[in-house]
Image: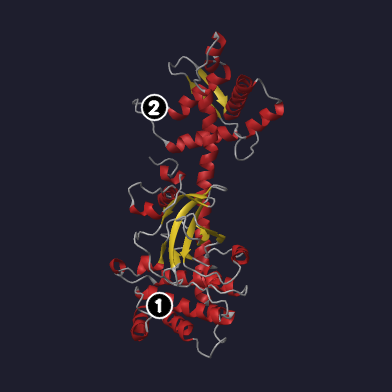
């Protein structure tokens, strides 16, 4: 029912946002079934991480990938901080630099579109036979690679919207610019190493891996130039939805396809990044960013709009949390069963508690003239808000038999609630631990205090 011009759904976070967060929670709890064949190569615990779950569907030995070696990826939970991480186990690799120094360098690089490197260690806990180099990155919930999302045979139907393409470009360009400005190179701009979420957030994964196992003689300017070619190639393959789109024999046809279906700016950017006119050092991420600055500003506007949306949704849940704390107090007080003495038996039906009981009937159990129940969510929220604030507005409370009529203000009811709840805290503390001082009691009571301070 609409109350005060609002629907019940107006009081809660958007359904899609709720589903996204619920999915995130479900993924963090994934566990491997005992009959899953992947159990054979999945240990119970590695280093400080437990509850390992393989993210690769492949049971057989993995193929050599973009990193130049075979690898397996696991979701795992840290016993130290309880957070979820992705463990990448590399087999048969040669460490070319001090991996601890690389861990420190890349661990300090934080960007919204880069999966942060957390740890690097060598362990034999995967198979108890050979040492494996393992990289620990943040776990991106709900993500799949660009290759899986756009370039698998069953998914290569339909064009990707131009707005979405430019969103991907803006996120990737920002990440590469961040890394290059700090004298490093990404080195992993491959469709199998760039992640995308259902919300179209893009993350560059595996940063720092090739700095440990790659060619240590490679010069940073050359690696940065390769990053730009990798960006152009990734955009081309994503838009054309094929890993073969960037191959020499298909390149011309792929560019023609983009020219026919998208704005010329997109084709020009791809050609600029892949061909790099003017020779080495003439094309940089900074010059590429300048060419599409207008597009980047459009994406910045979309980002601010999304921030405003998230703040609005968060505000709903903050208000709900405040009202939840108030309801916890009321439910602990009203009609609370007591024992041992007649006075205790009557506690919940006398004095302040009786007023609160009548208020609960007023807020939750109203009926229309024809005796139909009133299910008015907006009215309940309004009543609870006024009680939480303690406004001076007066209401008339009536007992269920109609024999008692009382006119009280919300400020009076709030005082009744606070006094009754304090009595419960005192009784509970004495009953459970032989009594506490006023300081401990106040600390306990503050945990139930409203989120905002209001005058009585």
Hey, which residue is sitting farthest top in the picture?
342
The numbered mark at residue 236 is: 1
Please determine whether, in this image, residue 27 is positioned above or below residue 179.
above
- Judge left or right: residue 247 versus residue 443: left
Secondary element under disc 2, as helix, strand or loop, is loop
Please determine whether, in this image, residue 288 is positioned above or below residue 421.
below
Please determine whether, in this image, residue 104 is positioned above or below residue 24.
below
Please determine whether, in this image, residue 114 is positioned above or below residue 279.
above
Quarter of the rendering occupied by the C terminus:
top right
Crowdedness near tag 1: few (<14), some (14–19) or many (≥20) residues, C-alpha within 10 Å: many
Among the two numbered marks 2 and 1 on one chain, the one whose residue lies closer to the N terminus: 1
Residue occupying the point 35% across, 79% down? 245
Residue occupying the point 51% across, 20% down? 336
Secondary element under disc 1, as helix, strand or loop, is helix
x then y, percent, for residue 321: 53, 40
Crowdedness near tag 2: few (<14), some (14–19) or many (≥20) residues, C-alpha within 10 Å: few
Q: How many marks?
A: 2
Relative depth, front residue between 116 and 132: 132
Give how far apart the Cα atoms at labels 2 and 1 are.
Answer: 64 Å
x then y, percent, for residue 317: 51, 45
Q: Nearer the viewer, mark 2 or mark 1?
A: 1
Whether pointer 2 and pointer 1 mark residues with C-beta atoms closer than 8 Å, the reply is: no
Relative depth, front residue between 12 and 111: 111
Rendering quarter of residue 198 = bottom left
The numbered mark at residue 160 is: none
In the picture of the structure, the residue carrying the numbered disc 2 is 367
x then y, percent, for residue 365: 42, 27
Residue occupying the point 33% across, 51% down? 36
x then y, percent, for residue 219: 58, 81
């Amino acid at each position: 029912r609409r109350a005060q011009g609002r629907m019940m759904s107006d009081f809660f976070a958007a359904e899609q946002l709720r589903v996204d967060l619920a999915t995130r929670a479900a993924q963090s709890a994934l566990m491997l079934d005992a009959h899953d064949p992947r159990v054979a190569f999945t240990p119970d615990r590695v280093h400080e991480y437990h509850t390992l779950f393989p993210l690769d569907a492949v049971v057989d030995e993995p193929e050599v990938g973009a990193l130049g070696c075979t690898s397996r990826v696991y979701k795992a939970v840290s016993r130290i901080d309880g957070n979820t991480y992705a463990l990448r186990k590399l087999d048969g690799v040669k460490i070319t630099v001090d991996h601890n120094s690389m861990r420190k360098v890349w661990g300090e690089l934080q960007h919204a579109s880069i999966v942060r490197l957390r740890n690097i260690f060598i362990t034999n806990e995967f198979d108890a036979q050979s040492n494996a180099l393992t990289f620990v990155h943040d776990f991106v919930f709900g993500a799949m690679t660009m290759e899986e999302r756009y370039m698998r045979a069953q998914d290569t139907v339909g064009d990707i919207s131009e707005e979405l393409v430019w969103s991907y470009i803006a996120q990737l360009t920002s990440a590469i610019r961040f890394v290059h400005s700090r004298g490093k190179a990404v080195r992993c701009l491959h469709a199998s190493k760039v992640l995308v979420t259902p919300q179209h957030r893009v993350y560059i994964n595996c940063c720092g891996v090739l700095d440990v196992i790659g060619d240590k003689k490679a010069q940073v300017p050359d690696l940065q130039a390769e990053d730009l070619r990798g960006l152009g190639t990734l955009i081309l393959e994503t838009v054309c939805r094929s890993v073969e789109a960037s191959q020499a024999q298909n390149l011309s046809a792929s560019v023609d396809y983009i020219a026919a279906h998208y704005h010329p700016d997109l084709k020009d950017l791809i050609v600029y990044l892949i061909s790099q006119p003017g020779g080495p050092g003439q094309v940089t991420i900074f010059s590429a960013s300048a060419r599409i600055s207008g597009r980047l500003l459009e994406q910045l506007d979309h980002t601010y709009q999304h921030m405003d949306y998230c703040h609005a949704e968060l505000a709903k849940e903050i208000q709900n949390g405040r009202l939840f704390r108030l309801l916890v107090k009321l439910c602990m007080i009203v009609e609370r069963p007591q024992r041992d003495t007649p006075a205790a038996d009557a506690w919940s039906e006398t004095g302040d508690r009786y007023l609160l009981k009548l208020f609960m009937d007023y807020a939750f159990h109203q009926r229309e003239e024809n005796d139909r129940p009133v299910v008015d969510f907006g009215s309940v929220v309004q009543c609870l808000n006024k009680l939480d604030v303690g406004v001076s507005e007066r209401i008339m409370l009536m007992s269920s038999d109609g024999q008692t009529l009382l006119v009280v203000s919300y400020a009076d009811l709030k005082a009744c609630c606070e006094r009754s709840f304090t009595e419960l805290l005192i009784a509970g503390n004495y009953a459970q631990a032989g009594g506490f001082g006023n300081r401990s009691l106040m600390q306990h009571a503050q945990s139930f205090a409203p989120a905002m301070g209001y005058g009585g």
